[in-house]
Amino acid sequence: NLLGRALPFEVVHITEYLADLKRQGRLKFKPYSEQAVTYHDPCQISRRGGATADARYLLDGFATDFREMTPTGNYNWCCGGGGGVQAMGRAADVRHEVFRIKMAQVEATGAPALVSACANCRLTMDESKAALKWDKELISIVELLADNLVPADKG
């Protein structure tokens, strides 16, 4: 409803769409056991869009060592770039300070990798990761799933 009127089609986030395909049995993934992962709930996707369960549904049974971060969902801490802050060059120090809290949340899980479903969060976290010399891996949930797709049977 960002345009002030209803759209003639349903808008869904990519995690909602992929979860729906998985529920229908149209997507299958080989288990991901390379490393433990935790998940960052992006502000706009979770608070505004209400899409928190589907990312976990996708990771459940796929990531063999999924470690839930706290707090989660609508109460998860921002990456530091929400609300347009990512676009403000002079706000880099603010982004990094906010990201320090996210770093502590990830560290508490013990997971070496942080998964997110938001490109803006990924950009913000990549920047802060480099500036703060943080050693965790940042992974897009879509890339992680795509890299582990099981090809469909053609018969």
Image (tube, helix red, strand yellow):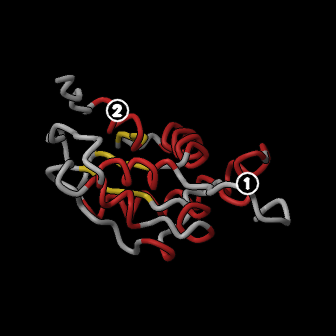
Looking at the image, do the residues carrying marks 1 and 2 touch, with CB atoms under 8 Å apart? Answer: no
| Residue at the disc numbered 2 | 146
Q: In this view, does 70 lie above or below 45?
A: below
Asked where in the image residue 84 lies, by quadrant, the reply is: bottom right
SS at mark 1?
A: helix
Question: Could you tell whether 112 is left or right of 84 in the image?
Answer: left
| Residue at the disc numbered 1 | 85
Q: Position of residue 34 (x, y in %)?
A: 17, 37
Q: Quadrant of the N terminus?
A: bottom right
SS at mark 2?
A: helix
In-front residue for pair 52/10: 10
Q: In this view, does 150 lie above or below 68?
A: above
Question: Could you tell whether 129 is left or right of 3 in the image?
Answer: left
Q: Position of residue 100 (x, y in %)?
A: 49, 59
Residue extending farthest to the right is 4
* Residue at 34 percent of width and 32 percent of height: 146
Q: Where is residue 117 in the image (x, y as percent from the top left)?
A: 47, 49
Q: What is the three-letter code of the residue carrying label 1?
A: Val
Question: Sequence order check: which comes first, mark 1 or mark 2?
Answer: 1
Q: What is the three-letter code of the residue carrying label 2?
A: Ala
Question: Could you tell whether 47 is left or right of 105 in the image?
Answer: right
Report, in whole angstroms, how far the alpha carbon at label 1 lies from the one at label 2: 29 Å
Asked where in the image residue 11 lies, by quadrant, the reply is: bottom right
* Residue at 35 percent of width and 43 percent of height: 136
In-front residue for pair 56/138: 56
Please identify, in this view, whether the residue under mark 1 or under mark 2 is nearer the observer. Answer: 2
Label 2 environment density (alpha carbons within 10 Å; few <14, some 14–19, many ≥20): few
